[in-house]
Image (spheres, helix red, strand yellow):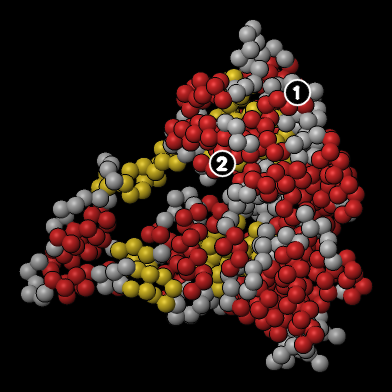
Amino acid sequence: MTSARAIELAALQQDLARAGYIAEAPLAAALLLMQDLGRPLLLEGDAGVGKTEVAKVLASIRGTRLIRLQCYEGLDAHAAMYEWNYQRQLLAIKLLEHDERGLQQKEQDIFSERYLLKRPLLEAITGDTAPVLLIDEIDRADEAFEAYLLELLSDFQLSIPELGTVHATHRPLVVITSNGTRELSDALRRRCLYQYIDYPDYEKELAIVRKKAPEVAAALAQQIVAFVQGVRRMELQKRPGIAETLDWTAALLRLGISTIDIDGAERIVQTLSALIKTRDDRAAFPREVVARLAATC
Amino acid sequence: MLSVAAPALDARVADRLAGFPTFLRANGFAVGGGDAVQVLRTAERVGVLDPHVLRWSLQALLCGRGDEWRRFPELFDAWFLPANRWQRPERREVSTGVAPGDSPDASAGSSDLADHDDDAAAPRRAASHEAVLGSTDFRALTEREHALDIEALMRRFARQLKPIRLRRQVRARAGRRLDLPATIRRSVASGGTPLHLAWRDRRRVRPRLVLLIDVSRSMALYSFFYLRLARALSAECTDVHSFIFHTGITAVSQALHDPDPWRAQERLHLIAQGWGGGTRIGESLAQFNREHAPRLVHSRTAIVVMSDGYDTGDPQRLSDALAQLRRRARRIVWLNPLCNRPGYAPTCQGMQAALPHLDLLAPGADLASIRAVLPNLIDALK
């Protein structure tokens, strides 16, 4: 028996697939729940498994704007929430010098919304429609910033000392990604739905390659995915993600390689720079290893 | 029949659902009191007829980190599938024993520890019991003796640890560049005349410290001392990450950081399998490179290895692992407890292999020698 929810879920998966994203059922279930409960979704997983893509594709199927906040070390409230346009304020002060109005009025004028520069977080809660807010690589920002973020995520409001509290007109769909370079606080985790995204298995990756590179022949696509899956099983510093698979596919097409086998190992070695990204890892792929991997494809 | 539209769930089903967060908490999940309500709300939304949809939804709702995510399916089955109900008190202690801050992919092959965790409950308990009888007594970890001295020394160390200047600028009390937005904001009080200036200066952060502590048999005399240093230090600075190694490497930061000394001992018990055994420094460091370094070690990380360098593994392997670490980290410092013995020269294979990659090789057998070497240490970490 299928419940109404299961049908809804399948429909969402189809929508996502149409938009070019192959989502497993648990992820689709989390995306539905995220809208029901109005909670942010925290995505964790290795680099290159398609975390950021989730937010992009969510915005596209919901037909809303994607507002992206890329986190970095030292990101502060000003860069993330709002900033006063101080050059214009400075100008305004000069212009108002010979104005007859009272001081209080002038001050109100200078600190009005006209001089407010909206940064991603403020923009996300003041728009006309509910956008998708992507907070990318939150683990790069400092712990202090996480605390700032908690206020937004729990009440969807921001306080600006000069203006007062800004309440959200619409609740944005918040997607947070983390690569795990730093342990996130429990408070943040508690407020979010959670999804761990692993490297795709053979079927899923094959579906992705077919979707993103439809010009590749079916047999070659299968070989490509089998080869990459083999590479991922090896002990590497940096395992290739989905983006690397697609890059490599493009590289193979460009060189006109139509099949992966032992005979072509020499040419495959030339394309590996799309797949292998560190010197130590590169040293782990002499011709023989490539030939052995190719033979199993 | 229950479905998405059903306004309320059957009382029996609701009871079962509401008990689930408590069951998860007993299994070491970080779920709170309010989660039962969320579970019921979720169940009302998604319906309870399709077990898969319910499982995926609750998994998203109740998990908070990678290891919880991986353990969830079997716990879900254990709680909701009638046949398995009797399995309830499952592996309670595992969750706290798991290495803290483990990278999401750590389960793939993280030391002996991970293997033990995967075992069924019974043999595991037996093994850890033997270990308790066999050797380690972690009471020394929080012993009163010298505790204050150690804390004072580590506080001094933390305070003197020179911050690294970054390119990025932040507001500062004094500096060379004017912070215009802040200056204008302050000028409001004086009617637009900037009387009080605000400044910007380059941001400074302390280096991240990664402590790798050798706990093999040859280090038995010193490893507790180093663990106490690590515990005191992680109470002083936030960005300290501690690991112990013998033939494999295990993260102990979370266990050391536990404010309750008794619980800290318990947690160390659980993860210290193989304590006092042989040493394979090269293997351990290679494992560290593989599992922890990518997310932990960046260009402002100082690595402190505390070991006597007696290595039963391949010295070439140690040299390679250190060379690799060298490329990621800012500094590598080696504290060797044997160093200040009269006539000591770093001639053992391990030290010979390590020496070319180190910024500093310093003695450190006890409090006095650490105190003596502190200025050099701070210089080297600069």
- Residue type pointed to by label 1: Ser
Residue B171 lies, in percent from the top left, at: 33, 49
Quarter of the image where one finds residue B70 = bottom right
- Does residue B322 lie above or below A290 as drawn? above
Q: Chain of mark 2?
A: B
- Does residue B103 lie above or below B329 as drawn? below
SS at mark 2? Answer: helix
- The disc placed on residue B234 is 2
Q: Name which of mark 1 and mark 2 comes first in the sequence.
A: 1
Mark yes or no: residue A291 visible. no
Quadrant in the picture for the N terminus of chain B: bottom right
Judge by depth and name the residue closer to the eye, A83 or A49: A83
Residue B137 lies, in percent from the top left, at: 75, 36
Judge by depth and name the residue closer to the eye, A37 or A118: A37
State the residue position of label 1. B218
Residue B145 lies, in percent from the top left, at: 60, 32
Residue B312 lies, in percent from the top left, at: 80, 23
- Does residue B145 lie above or below B59 as drawn? above
Q: Is residue A241 left or right of residue A93?
A: right
Label 1 Cα neighbours within 10 Å, binned few <14 / some 14-19 / many ≥20: some
Distance between the alpha carbons at the discs numbered 1 and 2: 25 Å
Residue that lies at the very extreme toward the front in this rendered image: B144
Residue at the location (38% across, 70% down)?
A159
Residue at the location (52% across, 31% down)?
B149
Judge by depth and name the residue closer to the eye, A58 or A295: A58
Quarter of the image where one finds residue A283 = top right
Residue at the location (59% across, 19% down)?
B363
Discs 1 and 2 carry the same chain letter: yes
Q: Is residue B242 left or right of residue A253?
A: left
